[in-house]
Image (cartoon, grey):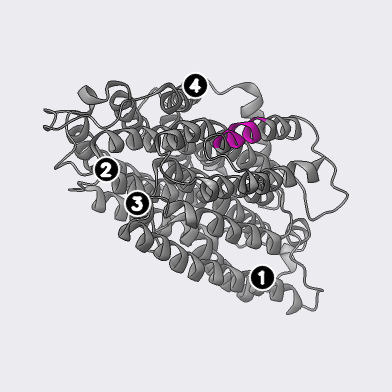
Amino acid sequence: MAYALLCFPFVMAAFAALFPSNRFRPWFLPVTAAVHAAATLLAIRGPGFETGTSVLVLDPLGKIVALVTGMLFLFGSVYAVGYLKIRSERNNRVFVSCLLSFLGLATLVAWSNHLGLTWVAIEGTTLATAPLIYFNRTKRSIEATWKYLLVGSVGIALALLGTFFLAYALLHEGIAPTLDFAELRRLAPDLSKPWLRAAFVLLLIGYGTKMGLAPMQTWKPDAYGEAPGLVGAILAAGVTSCAFLAFLRIYAIVNASGEGAYASRLLLFMGLLSMAVAGLFMLGQKDFKRMLAYSSVEHMGILMIGLGVGKAALFGTLLHVMTNASTKGVLFLSAANIHRAYDAKTTDEVRGAIRRQPVSGILFLAGFIAITGSPPFGPFVSEFAIVTGAFASGNFLTAALFLVFLLVVFIGMGKTTLRVVQGDMPEGAERFRDTALTLLPIFAFMALVLMLGLHIPAPLRALIEDAVRFLEVGA
């Protein structure tokens, strides 16, 4: 059953590539997403599908990312049907096939219990999403695609080197090397500490590049700014979650080895640096799609800070994976609707969006309020849990800087957002009007963001708590 779940998206991608109708091909996306989501929920709620191998295991960390990527793809697939209907002049064969391939690769990341296979799957997500960035076929989009590939390739190469170092940390101590995650965590106390530390730094930089941590975030503003809104959501909530899962497993190994304090210092530094860089670049930012890229940099930094704080903030950190992904869905999809209505993405040309696109404008404004950590939305709960954990664990300077950077981000992001939604509409004919298919997914994301802020369902809370206990083993 597990193999069927893993292979189903790839089979559907092949069918979509061979399907002749440009009009009906997009419907492969919601059909695949619905079946895949149902199977994923069965795997998450039950003991998990047996695979007969230790290479594929859906552990508590994998369950969270499988849930996040499944939800993201389910809602996004409905939006994709409406978007591709509007963009009927373009052949969507590659677009649909690559999206389905991404779902398969993200599922493989969630199920992988082997660090080498995890690396292959994450590199696969890069190759599957790169053609999506070039969908608009402009000079800037091809430049953004190549930057995404080149910077990402450097990062993933460093991650591969770090993976080799991790295996050598066993070999150096006379132990047979392995990349099996469960086995590495069991043998963690026996790992060579110098080689383990070197591996951790390389893996932090490598997977941090995929996440978009500063100063490795250089690919993000161009990729997010030039890609279709749906693709931006996939990159900001899907690809980054997969990379974070890979790093979570590295963190678990380092923690079990007794080197948690060493890792914590690096994580706190990288997290605070990312928040600071994001805040500075948001101040005076006129391009609202590039603004969302820097918001992603900020929230990847928040995840690193949560990990660096440790036990006291782990619940909030894992919850933030979900709240950030849901809110990014609201922001990227509503921003895409506004972009199409104006055929522009800077505040010099986009004003009065709440009048021209009332629903999308309101949702974009609500998304801004949510993503900046305002109640009663999900990010407020997860960020509050992280900063409370920082205070409880004695990381007072980290907590203080965290709050300062949140304020800077709020000011910078708020200035751009309010310019977009308020003011008088510029002259010119309306180019696009919201449709049911381009609005319903945003409402679904917004409902999820609000729910996570008001009440965390018991099954979801239990899932996160199980993952926290899983991370704490050996800590």
Tell me the residue at 70%/30% (across/down): 41
Give the amino acid type for the residue marked by disc 1 in the picture: Leu
| Residue 114 picture location, percent across and down | 73, 59
Task: For marks 3 and 2, give the CA distance.
Answer: 11 Å
Give the amino acid type for the residue marked by disc 3 in the picture: Glu
In the image, 399 versus 453, the foreground residue is 453
Say which residue label 3 marks: 226
Find the magenta span and give its range.
26-34
Give the left or right position of residue 6, taking residue 262 as reference: right
Give the amino acid type for the residue marked by disc 2 in the picture: Phe
Q: Quadrant of residue 222?
A: bottom left
Say which residue label 2 marks: 288
Residue 218 visible in the current orientation: no
Give the left or right position of residue 28, taking residue 278 as reference: right
Say which residue label 1 marks: 166
Tell me the residue at 40%/39% (across/down): 87
Task: For marks 1 and 2, give the CA distance.
Answer: 40 Å
| Residue 394 picture location, percent across and down | 45, 46
Number of marks: 4
Could you classify mark 3 by the number of other residues whose Cα lies within 10 Å: few (under 14), some (14-19), or many (20 or more)? many
Residue 16 visible in the current orientation: yes
Give the left or right position of residue 340, taking residue 330 as reference: left
Say which residue label 4 marks: 451
Q: Is residue 455 magenta?
A: no
Does the CB distance between marks 1 and 4 fall below 8 Å?
Answer: no
Marking on residue 186: none
In terms of sequence position, does the residue under pointer 2 or pointer 4 come before the other? 2
